[in-house]
Image (spheres, helix red, strand yellow):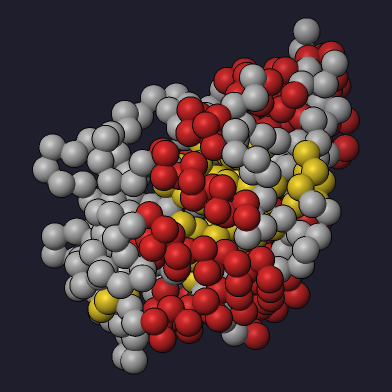
Amino acid sequence: MTARLFEPLTLRGLTLKNRVVVSPMQTYSAPDALPGAWHRVHLGRFALGGAGLVMGEATAVSPEGRSTADDLGLWSDDQERAMAELARAVQACGAAFGLQLQHAGRKASTTAPWQGFANAPIAAGSEVLGPSAHPASEGAHLPRAMTTEDMDRLVAAFAEAARRADRAGVDLVEIHMAHGYLLHSFLSPLANARRDDYGGSLANRMRFPLRIAKAVRKAWPQEKPLACRISSVDGVGIGWTLEESADFAKALAGVGVDLVDCSSGGMTLPERGMLVPRAPGFQLPFAAELRRVPGIATIAVGIITDARQAEAAIASGQADLVALGREMLENPNWALQAANALEPEQAYTRWPVPFGWWLKRRARASR
């Protein structure tokens, strides 16, 4: 009997072989913003490990949109060619390849996390942008409040990055609208203090992110699925709410978004503000709630580490896909080992043939 976790899922013209997703995880390892051999091996091992969809890390649509100087980018021909090599490598290893497009906004121009996320020098001719002139945290770069001309430029940049991703052979694009980066900072009242058509009411705060989604959908082929990663809530009873996320998901569906990747957090909260408590599967209720929106499928993410936990999330209808990040770093073969655990009578049949043939015989010999 096939486990629900290993049933195919079709989104537009893309059929994923199973419901296991490798989350986009920034590695801050791309000098000149180019993916290289390191990225091909890093992501290819997850594909060999059985995941149905491997997401490339956050990829900036413009130079000033990078979190660090070593983030990936997709605004040049050289980057497009390198991304095509990465896409082919992942697909050749058995998975669909997705790419997350982003602009870091107020969180741009920092060092890597193991260097403290400290302010890094702002490159000549660049600047840090945000919805308002308020830093992401105390001591962070002071952003310039974006003008409507800035927004027009970035709408075009996201659309052009989507066209480049398509030419590079990417199967799915995800727009990063979470974790305090530019588009989330427009959504959240904790960051957006504008008094024009892009601030204040929920409709106004959603306006710029929806412009981006609409432009990407128009630039991205109709047969390819489009996803958005959102912070379902900013925290407990503060800032952006789950009810607003549901309204936003409806609006995203209305412009052709197929899939919502349901995360949370990313804003610096006021004193006594509390993030959602972390426990295994702590963001599953967000995926379950947003899955009720007509036309939207959801990805559940957040301390999903056990095969039966992931299977239950799919079988119970809480989500259409489950995504793992750090657990995959610990065990790139997680998906294949989950298949063995959930389908013991078919052990090793989902493994790449050169692996499974030997491992099945080793298992028999060790009984």
Give coordinates of residue 30: x percent, y percent: 50, 70
Query: Farthest top residue?
Result: 367
Quadrant of res 226: bottom right
Rendered residue at 60%/67% (across/down): 214
Can residue 160 be seen here? The reply is yes
Quadrant of res 357: top right
Rendered residue at 55%/53% (across/down): 251
Quarter of the figure that contains the N terminus = top right
Quarter of the figure that contains the C terminus = top right
Can residue 227 be seen here? The reply is no
Rendered residue at 72%/55% (across/down): 225
Name the residue nearer the viewer: 32 or 161.
161
Q: Measured along the vertical axis of the image, is residue 281 above or below residue 229? A: above
Rendered residue at 26%/35% (across/down): 237
Name the residue nearer the viewer: 158 or 39.
158
Name the residue nearer the viewer: 275 or 44.
275
